[in-house]
């Protein structure tokens, strides 16, 4: 019953015709999510200084913690499929893309990019956005290619970067950019388009050297992470697994090699020395590759 919604220990007594026919102890424990949460939508996608934000999805715990990057946001209401937040004013906070995370008491998290805080309402019309990148990856390393980026609100003076490399722009309009990608090593890189006003759009883009993905049961937890990050996957043969962590510029900040037998494999990385931010974990064994973004607090 709703009257017993507070965790604790209660005495239970069943009385029939004035006589006790049963007596016992009932323990109420805090809700713990069994399944991982997932975010399907954040509305509005941008905020002007402050306001109410609604996050929809599944498997939200009533004791979930919501963060904007590392800042805990106050919750107005929460249900398994919706969270309403009283978004505080972040005056001067003009970062175009931040991370919203929902973390349940069991440590499982869902993360999603959030557009940011718009101080000047007119800026909303100046924010660039990437809708498609072609090709969506490159199957051979060390090969120069032409990259086509489609979207909107691109400035003709925009700067395009792949990781830390500034790309040569062949043509540019408000909805389409054609850029030259020089030969670069295989890996996952952050592709960004930055307008002169400082606003940027970005997404990960990679060179995959034609390898297949690891098993679909590959998981990474907890996410966000504070001190340790655990990878679980299934390998079809014994091999050496290379675990590489890259920052949003595509720079390698941590790498470890693990010898693994075929079957289920688990590896834990110490990420306590990494600065807070968004990273990409890549796992490969020469025949297969897998990658996922994670947040370090």
Image (cartoon, rainbow, N blue to C red):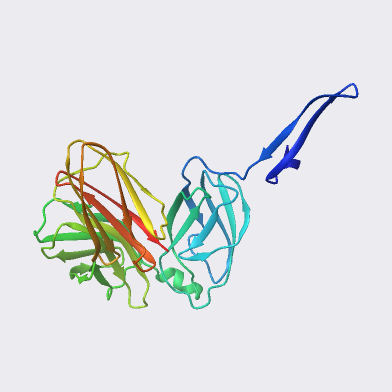
Which of the 4 quarters of the picture holds residue 179?
A: bottom left
Question: In the shown orientation, is residue 230 left or right of residue 17?
Answer: left
Q: Position of residue 209 (x, y in %)?
A: 14, 50
Q: Quadrant of the N terminus?
A: top right
Q: Is residue 11 or residue 144 the one in the foreground? A: 11
Q: Residue at x 50, y 40 (%)?
A: 34
Q: Position of residue 39 (x, y in %)?
A: 47, 49
Question: In the shown orientation, is residue 158 left or right of residue 67?
Answer: left
Q: Residue at x 76, y 42 (%)?
A: 3
Q: How many marks?
A: 0
Q: Is residue 44 or residue 191 the one in the foreground? A: 191
Q: Position of residue 113 (x, y in %)?
A: 41, 59
In the rendered view, would you say 115 is above or below 112? below
Q: Residue furthest right?
A: 18
Q: Residue at x 15, y 57 (%)?
A: 186
Question: In the shown orientation, is residue 116 left or right of residue 149?
Answer: right
Q: Position of residue 171 (x, y in %)?
A: 19, 68
Question: In the shown orientation, is residue 257 left or right of residue 13?
Answer: left
């Amino acid at each position: 019953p709703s009257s017993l919604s507070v965790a604790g220990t209660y005495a239970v007594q069943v009385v029939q015709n004035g006589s006790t026919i049963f007596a016992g102890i009932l323990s109420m424990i805090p809700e713990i999510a069994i399944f991982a949460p997932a975010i399907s939508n954040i509305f509005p996608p941008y905020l002007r200084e402050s306001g109410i934000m609604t996050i929809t999805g599944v498997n939200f715990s009533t004791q979930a913690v919501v963060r904007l990057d590392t800042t805990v946001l106050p919750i107005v209401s929460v249900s398994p499929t919706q969270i309403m937040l009283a978004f505080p004013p972040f005056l001067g906070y003009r970062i175009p893309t931040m991370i919203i995370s929902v973390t349940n008491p069991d440590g499982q998290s869902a993360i999603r990019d959030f557009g940011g805080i718009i101080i000047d309402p007119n800026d909303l019309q100046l924010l660039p956005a990437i809708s498609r990148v072609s090709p969506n990856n490159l199957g051979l390393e060390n090969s120069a290619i032409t990259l086509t980026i489609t979207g909107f609100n691109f400035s003709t003076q925009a700067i395009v970067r792949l990781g830390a490399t500034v790309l040569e722009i062949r043509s540019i309009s408000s909805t389409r950019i054609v850029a030259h990608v020089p030969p670069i090593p295989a890996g996952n890189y952050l592709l960004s388009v930055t307008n002169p006003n400082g606003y940027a759009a970005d997404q990960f883009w990679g060179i995959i050297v034609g390898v297949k993905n690891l098993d679909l049961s590959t998981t990474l937890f907890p996410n966000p992470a504070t001190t340790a990050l655990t990878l679980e996957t299934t390998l079809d043969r014994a091999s050496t697994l290379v675990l590489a962590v890259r920052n949003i510029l595509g720079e390698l900040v941590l790498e470890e090699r693990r010898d693994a037998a075929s079957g289920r494999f688990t590896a834990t990385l110490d990420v306590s020395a990494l600065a807070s931010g968004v990273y990409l974990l890549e796992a490969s064994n020469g025949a297969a590759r897998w990658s996922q973004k994670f947040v370090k607090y």
